[in-house]
Amino acid sequence: MGLIHTIKGFEIAASNAALSGEFNDVLLALNLSPLVHSDRDAELLAREMILAHEKWLPNFADCIAELKKAH
C-alpha cells in the first residue's frame, strides 16, 4: 500500500499544480513522484516540460513568462 499512497499523493499534487499554474506546486508534485530522484532533477524536468508544452498550459502563462526571462 505504501507505493499506492505515494503515487496517489503525487497525482493529487500534480492536479493541484495544473490548476494553480504555480511553478512551486509543480516542483512539489514532482518531488513526491517516486520516479524523480532529486530536487535538481525535478526543477530541470519542470522547466523543460512547462516550456515544451506551453500552448496547452494557459494557467502557467505567468510562470512561462518568468521562465523565458530567466533563459
Image: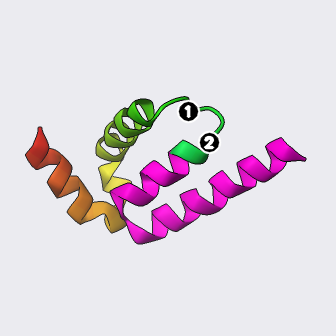
- SS at mark 2? loop
Residue at the image point whose x is 31% and y is 62% from the top: 60
- In the figure, is residue 5 to the left or right of 33? right
How far apart are the alpha carbons under marks 2 and 1?
A: 6 Å
Where in the figure is residue 16, as x and y percent of width and height? 53, 67
Number of numbered discs overlaid on the protein picture: 2
Magenta segment, which residues?
1-30
Residue at the image point whose x is 73% and y is 48% from the top: 6
Where in the figure is residue 37, as x and y percent of width and height? 55, 29
> Hey, which quadrant is residue 48 in on the image?
top left
Q: What type is the residue that disc 2 sits on?
A: Ser
Crowd band around label 1 with a 10 angstrom C-alpha radius: few (<14), some (14–19), many (20+)? some
- In the figure, is residue 18 to the left or right of 6? left
- SS at mark 1? loop
The residue indicated by pointer 2 is 33
Q: Are marks 2 and 1 in contact (CB under 8 Å)?
A: yes
Residue 35 among magenta residues: no
Query: Which secondary structure type mostly characterizes the magenta part of the structure?
Result: helix
Residue at the image point whose x is 25% and y is 58% from the top: 63
Crowd band around label 2 with a 10 angstrom C-alpha radius: few (<14), some (14–19), many (20+)? many
Q: What type is the residue that disc 1 sits on?
A: Val
The C terminus - image quarter: top left
Where in the figure is residue 56, as x and y percent of width and height? 38, 56
Residue 57 image label:
none
State the colouring used for the structure image: rainbow
Residue 8 among magenta residues: yes
> Hey, which quadrant is residue 23 in on the image?
bottom left
Where in the figure is residue 59, as x and y percent of width and height? 35, 68
Residue at the image point whose x is 28% and y is 44% from the top: 51
The residue indicated by pointer 1 is 36
